[in-house]
Image (cartoon, grey):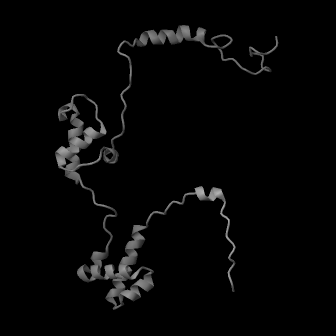
Amino acid sequence: MPTSSKPVRVPASSAKIRTVRPRRDFTALEARRLRAAEMFTKGATQADVARELGVSRPTALEWYRKWSGGGKKALRAGRPGRPPLLDASDMARVVKALRAGPVANGFPTERWTLPRVAEVIEVLTGVSYHPGHVWYILRAMGWSRQRPARRAIERDDAAIDAWVKQRWPAVKKTPDGARPGSASRTRAGSVSSPR
């Protein structure tokens, strides 16, 4: 049966839709590798494993090499992704140094910045991180961004409170400072309603 050669129109709005890749199911992937180990144990070839489990031949070859070198245990799942450069003892030293404060680490002010934290990590562990990546490490340690409150040195909180309680109601643009006004012409309390 011949297929149609007409072009299919794709709406412009669908071009903006971004598909999100589903997360990999690591337990299912490990189960598939362990199934391959069982098949190798029973004498299946790499091609049989590739065909049966729906993987490429190079993947089946890689699994075969791991299985023949270390058995079923070699096909168990490890940690996904790149291994971390800092281990738990390194992280503990970094946390201790950060808690001591910036001045204790040789900086002139009491403010941590990402480049400063990156420098402390490099001095303590020898591992160099880009300042932009340091934020991910801080979040993993449970730290959050803190911004200092900017207040004038001359600030007088008592005078501010008095102004808000006494002067502000008189300055506020409402019919009388005590109750809120309305812009509706049909409400009796409105400034714009006919009297």
Which residue corresponds to the image point at 67% horizontal and 69% vertical from the top-left? Answer: 8
Question: Residue 29 sits in which quadrant?
Answer: bottom left
Q: In this view, does 68 lie to the left or right of 170?
A: left
Q: 118 and 154: which one is in front?
A: 118
Q: 171 and 12: which one is in front?
A: 12
Which residue corresponds to the image point at 59% horizontal and 10% vertical from the top-left? Answer: 171
Question: Residue 31 sits in which quadrant?
Answer: bottom left
Residue 116 vertical position relative to residue 180 in the rendered view, above or below: below
Q: 16 and 97: which one is in front?
A: 16
Percent across and percent down for residue 45 are 36, 90
Which residue corresponds to the image point at 24% horizontal and 37% vertical from the top-left? Answer: 99
Which residue corresponds to the image point at 40% horizontal and 88% vertical from the top-left? Answer: 48
Question: Residue 39 sits in which quadrant?
Answer: bottom left
Q: In this view, does 62 lie to the left or right of 187?
A: left
Percent across and percent down for residue 183 are 73, 20
Q: Name the quarter where the N terminus is drawn.
A: bottom right
Percent across and percent down for residue 172 are 61, 13
